[in-house]
Image (cartoon, rainbow, N blue to C red):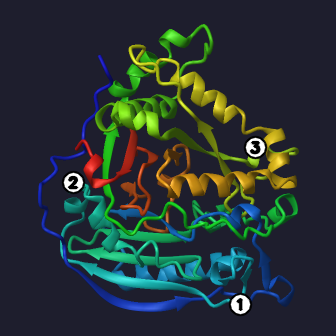
């Protein structure tokens, strides 16, 4: 028996799109000016090769006791104060080399949504979530952060955040006193490089992406032993939730969409985003600024009839290979950049299919209290990449939400 999964709602075939009215747009600047000696923030190598795209997060809140103006102004002040410590976010990216920390500010918007917040949560249509965002995800230009506050008819709120994938840093605070101010010295470990010949936008698509969110509750996740049972001799550690769901989603995708002929013509890989902060020597602080991550790359050995039972071991080995030696080579040699150029060429020619997983599980997203209680739900939107899965913790119960992005013709849902 395979793990079962359920949608969070009964999904309508053609849900009516809620109307959204943009009420105001302004610019928030740091509450204190950035000193002259901090006016240029050097992008480091991993920032440079990151795609020029926004990463979206949406925080949904029940109706607060305060009125709309008080809420909007409170968040405005909090953001202004926070930007003083996260000053690069209020700057502008220049030539993929540095951030001009000119206190140019971040776009801050207010919108009215003519429906109940429960409607958006129940229908769970990621494509509609994009309308709540301040910008389209590929409209990043030279911005690093944008925020939009959406007020629903019922008084509920959705705070939509778009942050540049090049820095991929956010302050998820439990009140102002709990914010950990970042360190901005990552360029010392990963010096910038000349990346000419590599296009960071590789993989971004302008075509439609079919996105859907699934909820895997504890009963489904208890079946995760299925994926490690036969491999216990090689890897006695129990499969994690993320490992088990990665194996489940990958195998179902391959079985339902890929023919034997495709398997002979393409290179298929599984990519898991790996946080490098704990894999440096010495380890970096968790609040080091920037996109300090790389991918563990698994090329699955797909022996039919064995139900991919060794996939967990293969993925774990690939992630384990992203170690101190890997990070040292990443920082000191040109080998990784050469690999990226070659991989991009194969991808553009249709010879490589990479299926990517990234996990925000255990991130304190549900602790994001902007002054009116914690969120009742945290979600994402339809992304601009195919074959990408993002995992989120559910609010309660130990479950996981999987936001899956596929080509429309591949979707099994």
Residue 278, label in figure: 3
Distance, label 1 to label 3, CA atoms, is 32 Å
**Does residue 71 sit above or below 275 in this rendering?**
below
The tag earlier along the polypeptide, 1 or 3, is: 1
Pick the residue in front: 201 or 43. 201
To which residue does mark 1 refer? Answer: 102
Q: Write the residue at 81% across / 67% down.
A: 192
Q: What x and y, as percent, mark residue 141? A: 55, 82
Pick the residue in front: 199 or 126. 199
Mark 3 secondary-structure assignment: helix
The tag earlier along the polypeptide, 1 or 2, is: 1
- Note whether residue 90 is visible: yes
Q: What x and y, as percent, mark residue 144? A: 59, 76
- Note whether residue 283 is visible: no
Lateral position of residue 195 relative to residue 152, left or right: right
Residue 122, label in figure: 2
Distance, label 1 to label 2, CA atoms, is 42 Å
Outermost residue, top direction? 233
């Amino acid at each position: 028996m395979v793990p079962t999964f359920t949608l969070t709602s009964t999904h309508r075939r053609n849900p009516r799109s809620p109307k959204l009215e943009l009420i105001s747009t302004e610019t928030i600047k740091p509450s204190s000016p950035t000193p002259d000696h901090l006016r240029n923030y050097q992008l480091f190598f991993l920032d440079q090769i990151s795609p020029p795209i926004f990463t979206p997060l949406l925080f949904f809140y029940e109706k607060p006791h305060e009125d709309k103006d008080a809420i909007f102004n409170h968040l405005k002040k909090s953001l202004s104060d926070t930007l003083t410590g996260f000053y690069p976010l209020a700057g502008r990216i220049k030539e993929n080399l540095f951030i001009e920390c000119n206190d140019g500010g971040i776009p801050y918007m207010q919108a009215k949504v003519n429906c109940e917040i429960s409607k958006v949560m129940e229908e769970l249509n990621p494509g509609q979530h994009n309308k709540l965002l301040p910008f389209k995800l590929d409209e990043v230009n030279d911005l690093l952060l944008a925020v939009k506050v959406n007020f629903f008819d019922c008084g509920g709120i959705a705070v939509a955040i778009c942050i540049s994938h090049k820095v991929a840093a956010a302050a998820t605070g439990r009140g102002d006193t709990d914010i950990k101010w970042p360190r901005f010295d990552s360029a010392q470990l990963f010096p910038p490089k000349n990346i000419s010949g590599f296009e960071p936008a590789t993989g971004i698509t302008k075509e439609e992406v079919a996105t859907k969110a699934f909820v895997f509750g504890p009963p489904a996740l208890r079946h995760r032993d299925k994926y490690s049972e036969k491999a216990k001799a090689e890897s006695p550690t129990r499969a994690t939730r993320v490992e088990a769901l990665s194996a489940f989603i990958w195998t179902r995708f391959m079985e339902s969409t890929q023919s034997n002929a495709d398997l002979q013509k393409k290179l298929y890989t599984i990519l898991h985003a790996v946080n490098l902060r704990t894999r440096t020597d010495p380890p970096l602080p968790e609040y080091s600024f920037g996109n300090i991550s790389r991918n563990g790359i698994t090329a699955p050995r797909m022996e039919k009839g064995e139900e991919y039972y060794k996939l967990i071991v293969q993925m774990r080995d690939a992630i384990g290979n992203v170690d101190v030696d890997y990070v040292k080579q990443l920082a000191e040699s040109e080998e990784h950049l050469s690999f990226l150029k070659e991989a991009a060429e194969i991808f553009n020619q249709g010879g490589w299919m990479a299926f990517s997983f990234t996990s925000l599980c255990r991130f304190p997203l549900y602790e994001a209290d902007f002054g009116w209680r914690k969120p009742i739900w945290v979600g994402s939107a339809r992304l601009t990449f195919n074959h990408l899965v993002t995992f989120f913790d559910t609010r309660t119960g130990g479950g996981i939400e999987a936001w899956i992005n596929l080509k429309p013709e591949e979707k099994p849902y």
